């Protein structure tokens, strides 16, 4: 039986419409959420994502401002901008689109963002809070992964979750999130011995490695839920880290690329921004 295709585009649109109602109520009370997006240099993919973020803000009624800076900006100038945004009461969320061009220190920039405005959830304060179970901003992509699984009606507690990839922005926080949901979590990476065998144990398989169509049918346990976080450009087309055509024959549910996790990343950014405005 072919898998259910999880419609991230549609679920993200549903979340945006829920947020729109909330933002209308907040704006009526003089508390319109505001997001500052900082884009440095001319990475074409970053420009696409930033445009989608601005568009989502506009749709929901979140105030947004874009700070588009040349790749030649100094570290000091970038930090000074972060300081201004930290102090600006209109701004509840600050997002510095990554990767930064060579020569700029990402870690120092992230550390400079007030953790209460860190709607990306990348500041060590939020990373630490997530890991010890305190309320925290959760990075948008893994938050979107969890939300997709939940809204698909999949039970998580007690399930075996395998996360393929250990990046700070997806793999590691995804593992923490599923652990918080009482799953049994395994994290695999480039040095894992027999990854296929590990993946084949998963009830829920989350793939975030950046290798086009890496995951094949025989890596997946029949009936598993497969979440593909990969965005790879191959011959001008976007493909995921999962070989969708063959894996959909064995999975019970699977996300497509595009139209799966990507739109959820943006929806979760909107959600974090609204939460920040509600709390601060
Ligand atoms: N940096 C992100 N860098 C890259 N795909 C995103 C993303 C939307 N600070 C910071 O926004 O959260 C971030 N915070 N990221 N990403 C990746 C990562 C960042 C990736 C894909 C999409 C955001 C998205 O909407 C569409 C889809 O999968 O359907 C396809 C869009 C396309 O490329 O045409």
Image (cartoon, helix red, strand yellow):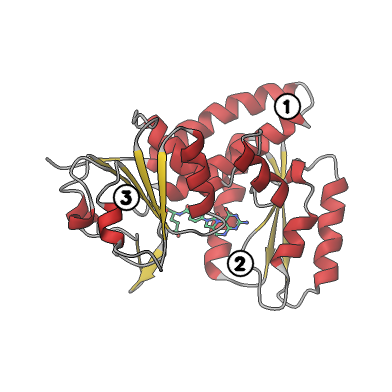
Would residue 265 be seen by someone viewing this image from the given angle? no
Q: Residue furthest left?
A: 1
Would residue 153 be seen by someone viewing this image from the given angle? yes
How many residues crowd around disc 3 within 10 Å: few (fewer than 14), some, or many (20 or more)?
Answer: many
In the image, residue 235 lies at what x, y percent? 33, 74
Which mark, residue 99? 2
In the image, residue 163 lies at what x, y percent? 40, 51
First in sequence, mark 1 or 2: give its number.
Answer: 1
- Could you say which is closer to the camera, residue 240 or residue 51? 240
C-alpha gap between disc 2 and disc 3: 24 Å
The residue wearing badge 3 is 256
Q: Is 21 on the left-hand or right-hand side of 212?
A: right
- Could you say which is closer to the camera, residue 274 or residue 154? 154
Going 49% across and 47% down the picture, which residue do you hit? 174
- Could you say which is closer to the camera, residue 194 or residue 247? 194
First in sequence, mark 1 or 3: give its number.
Answer: 1
C-alpha gap between disc 1 and disc 3: 35 Å
Q: Is 261 on the left-hand or right-hand side of 7?
A: right
Q: Quadrant of residue 158?
A: top left
The residue wearing badge 1 is 27
Element on which disc 2 rests:
loop
Is residue 187 depicted above or below 264 in this figure? Answer: below
Mark 1 or mark 2, which is nearer to you? 2
In the image, residue 126 lies at what x, y percent? 68, 44
**Quadrant holding the N terminus:** top left
First in sequence, mark 2 or 3: give its number.
Answer: 2
In the image, residue 160 lies at what x, y percent? 34, 40
């Amino acid at each position: 039986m072919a898998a259910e295709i999880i419609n991230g585009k549609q679920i993200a649109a549903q979340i945006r419409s829920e947020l729109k109602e909330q933002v209308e109520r907040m704006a009526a009370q003089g508390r319109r959420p505001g997001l500052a997006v900082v884009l440095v240099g001319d990475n074409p993919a970053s420009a696409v994502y930033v445009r989608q973020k601005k568009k989502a803000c506009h749709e929901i009624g979140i105030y947004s401002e874009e700070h588009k800076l040349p790749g030649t900006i100094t570290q000091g100038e970038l930090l000074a901008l972060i300081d201004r945004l930290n102090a600006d009461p209109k701004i509840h969320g600050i997002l510095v689109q990554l990767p930064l061009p060579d020569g700029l220190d990402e870690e120092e920039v992230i550390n400079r963002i007030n953790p209460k405005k860190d709607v990306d959830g990348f500041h060590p304060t939020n990373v630490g809070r997530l890991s010890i179970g305190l309320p925290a901003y959760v990075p948008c992509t893994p938050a979107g992964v969890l939300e997709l699984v939940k809204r698909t009606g999949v039970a998580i507690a007690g399930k075996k979750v395998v996360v393929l990839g250990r990046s700070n922005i997806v793999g590691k926080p995804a593992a923490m999130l599923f652990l918080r949901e009482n799953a049994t979590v395994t994290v695999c990476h480039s040095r894992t011995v027999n990854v296929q065998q590990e993946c084949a144990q998963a009830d829920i398989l989350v793939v975030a490695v950046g290798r086009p169509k890496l995951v094949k049918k025989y890596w997946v346990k029949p009936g598993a839920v497969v979440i593909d976080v990969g965005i790879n450009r191959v011959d001008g087309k976007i493909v995921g880290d999962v070989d969708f055509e063959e894996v959909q024959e064995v999975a019970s549910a699977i996300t497509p690329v595009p139209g799966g996790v990507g739109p959820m990343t943006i929806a979760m950014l909107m959600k974090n921004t609204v939460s920040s405005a509600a709390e601060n």
